[in-house]
Image (spheres, coloured by chain):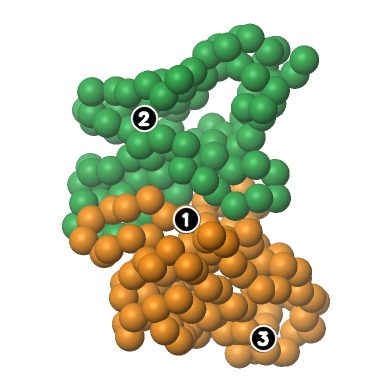
Chain colours: A orange, B green
Amino acid sequence: NAGVTQTPKFQVLKTGQSMTLQCAQDMNHNSMYWYRQDPGMGLRLIYYSASEGTTDKGEVPNGYNVSRLNKREFSLRLESAAPSQTSVYFCASSAPFVSYNEQFFGPGTRLTVL
Amino acid sequence: RKEVEQDPGPFNVPEGATVAFNCTYSNSASQSFFWYRQDCRKEPKLLMSVYSSGNEDGRFTAQLNRASQYISLLIRDSKLSDSATYLCVVARSNDYKLSFGAGTTVTVRA
């Protein structure tokens, strides 16, 4: 099993450019999440999807959009990248959304916005 | 105030030593507690859950103090492979959301 996969692993953008970060999981998990991790700060939730067909904002959603394409895939889009969005982005998934279950993380995407 | 606060360290310890560190959380409604481990430039992975009565997993012992709102992690007989950043994670029982601390860095030297 691949677990949670993310593409790309690295990306450099210029201010104003757009891009989509892809995430897929093969564990049949209902819930999926997008986080960003910045130096000296904990992971912060950008958006989440409790189940296929639903998405909701997390702690820092501004400047991002998401799509839960199907049960396996959850993408994060930056419409107009800004230097403040330079970060490491992690996708995660977890089992049925009833109570807390372990979240499994992808390897991350390192994004630099110039 | 951050919801979860940790001493960033680093804690530099020799092999075989014991190292312990805490994290504090601000939301008294928090119900679930965890330690995740994150290696340099890698993704976080669950190390262990933290139960009210305290629990051990091999050389790792986790404790929860609800009255003072902190959890702790103790690593005995440290190995070089224990070098990592340890993330304190807190969740509310009625909410899937996790709150992450910024992490405590541990470096074990030979």
Looking at marks 1 and 3 on the same chain, the residue that comes earlier in the sequence is marked by 3
The answer to whether B31 is drawn above or below residue B84 in the figure is: below
Is B72 placed above or below A22 here? Answer: above
| Disc 1 secondary structure class | strand
User: In the visual, does A44 lie left or right of A49?
Assistant: right
For mark 2, what is the residue? B71
Callout 1 touching callout 3 (CB < 8 Å): no
Which numbered disc, 1 or 3, marks the residue closer to the eye?
A: 1
- Residue B72 pos. (x, y %): 41, 26
Q: Quadrant of the C terminus of chain B?
A: top right
Residue found at x 37% / y 75%? A49
Of badges 2 and 1, nearer the viewer stands 1
Choose top left, top right, bottom left or bottom right for residue A57: bottom left
**Alpha-carbon span between mark 1 and mark 3:** 24 Å
Do pointers 3 and 2 mark residues of a single chain? no
Residue B83 visible within the image: yes
Location of mark 1 (residue): A104
Kind of residue sitting beneath label 1: Phe
Which residue is located at x 53 percent, y 73 percent?
Answer: A24
x, y (%) of residue A27?
43, 64
